[in-house]
């Protein structure tokens, strides 16, 4: 066992000990989580938006009247593969968006009971609809929520848009994901966190179970030199392969993000910046940093084309890539079929040879974090000060080694 693995399991065991055996209280948070705030801030002071601004709703659309918004993180494969994220959180709406708003949305329905909507222009995952519910249910992605208001104090008073109520579909992760990092802030005060292997109320788990899942996942052998990592969105419109990292052969802007002692794993970390949040739809966006030449189009076996060349006719044959410019020199790429965020690329001189790949679409054998392929940056969150869920940012910064 390496020193890094030892620290990983030690930290996991400490967090499990902190929570295992704690008294179990109510299985559901009340509609409003304002009981944890002395001066609850109304959600009507916020608004909902995507990165390009084409999709916009007032804060009065939110069903919960105050911040933070209770939300159970869904770790199911469809949520990860349609978004590129690892922490999909949703908040209920009072009613469906207007027909004018819906006309600007891409629609992806892969089951009769669930429809996902994303902005056609920037790719932001925006809404989920449950059309077969007794009353047609609509939810927004919580990363869309922009805190605002006439009073400056109101905007600054919301530390967290989301209060983590629990985690569901943990089995789909196969490695426990980043759940252990957030155990200290999951659930109501003094309660045991709500952890379920499948849907809410089905096969409850505890932190020790997560420890066992993670240890089993950690037994996967590292990839061989000719192996490639599968990366694919939910609809299959983006089907990719990523070559194994080779420290000595990587361009400097990639190798500078790696460790020489760990030559076959790319760096990965979460970003909390506003642009990533509003393009993916979730407050913490996971990226791994890969050389352009190492990202392969499965359909053609050729490297994926990035930047201005990617927008030329015939580029990236067979891929449903769409692009949005959050700046003139930035391409944020997503699947035009299901809306999954896939790439961030900039032609800035310092990063011209590297592309950020959304970790949520990776299909590693070990599980959602793809630990045999990527090395997670300990205790670091890019642009953490911009995060709209500061408690989650702090957990990653303080307990990040567990990832």
Image: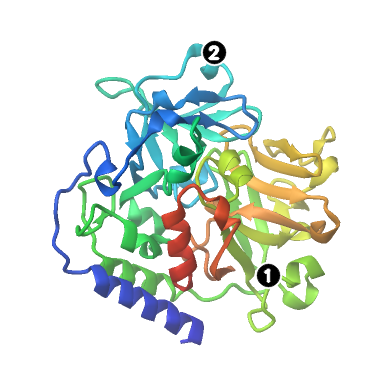
Instruction: Look at 63% across and 67% down and name the residue there.
Output: 267
Question: Residue at label 2?
Answer: 100
Q: What element carries label 1?
A: loop
Is 115 located above or below residue 398 in the figure? above
Q: In this view, does 177 lie above or below 9?
A: above
Q: Is residue 367 visible?
A: no
Q: In which quarter of the image is residue 310?
A: top right
Alpha-carbon distance for marks 2 and 1?
A: 50 Å
Q: Is residue 403 left or right of residue 269?
A: left
Residue 140, position as x, y percentages in the image? 43, 32
User: What secondary structure is marked by label 2?
Assistant: helix
Numbered tag placed on residue 226 in the rendering: 1
What's the mark number on residue 270?
none
Residue 361 x/y as whole percent: 55, 50
Query: In front here: 319 or 68?
Result: 68
Q: Find residue 124 and report its horizontal and vertical position in percent.
A: 57, 35
Residue beneath the point at 47% across and 41% down: 153
């Amino acid at each position: 066992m390496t020193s890094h693995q030892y620290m990983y399991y030690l930290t996991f065991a400490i967090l499990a000990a902190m929570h295992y055996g704690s008294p179990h209280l109510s299985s559901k948070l009340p509609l409003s989580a304002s009981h944890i705030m002395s001066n609850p801030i109304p959600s009507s002071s916020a608004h909902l938006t995507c990165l390009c601004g084409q999709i916009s709703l007032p804060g009065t659309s939110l069903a919960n009247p105050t911040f933070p918004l209770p939300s159970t993180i869904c770790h199911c494969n469809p949520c990860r593969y349609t978004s590129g994220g690892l922490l999909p959180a949703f908040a209920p709406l009072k009613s469906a968006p207007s027909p004018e708003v819906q006309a600007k949305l891409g629609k992806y329905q892969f089951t009769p009971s669930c429809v996902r909507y994303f902005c056609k222009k920037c790719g932001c995952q925006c809404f989920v609809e449950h059309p077969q519910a007794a009353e047609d249910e609509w939810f927004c992605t919580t990363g869309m929520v922009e805190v605002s208001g006439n009073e400056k104090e109101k905007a600054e008073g919301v530390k967290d848009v989301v209060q983590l109520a629990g985690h569901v579909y943990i089995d789909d992760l196969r490695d426990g994901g980043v759940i252990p990092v957030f155990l200290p802030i999951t659930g109501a005060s003094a309660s045991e966190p709500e952890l379920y292997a499948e849907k809410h109320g089905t096969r409850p788990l505890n932190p020790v179970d997560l420890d066992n899942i993670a240890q089993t996942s950690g037994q996967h052998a590292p990839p061989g030199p000719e192996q490639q990592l599968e990366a694919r969105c939910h609809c299959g419109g983006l089907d990719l392969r990523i070559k194994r990292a080779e420290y000595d052969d990587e361009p400097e802007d990639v190798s500078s993000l790696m460790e020489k002692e760990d030559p076959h794993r790319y760096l990965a970390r979460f970003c909390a910046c506003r642009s990533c949040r509003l393009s993916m739809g979730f407050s913490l966006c996971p990226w791994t940093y890969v050389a352009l030449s190492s990202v392969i189009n499965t359909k053609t076996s050729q490297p994926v084309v990035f930047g201005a060349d990617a927008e030329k006719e015939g580029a990236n044959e067979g891929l449903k890539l769409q692009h949005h410019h959050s700046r003139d020199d930035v391409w944020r790429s997503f699947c035009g079929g299901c809306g999954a965020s896939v790439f961030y690329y900039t032609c800035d001189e310092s990063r011209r040879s590297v592309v950020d790949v959304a970790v949520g679409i990776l299909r590693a054998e070990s599980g959602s974090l793809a630990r045999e392929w990527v090395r997670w940056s300990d205790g670091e969150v890019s642009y953490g000060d911009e995060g709209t869920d500061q408690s989650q940012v702090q957990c990653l910064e303080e307990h990040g080694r567990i990832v």
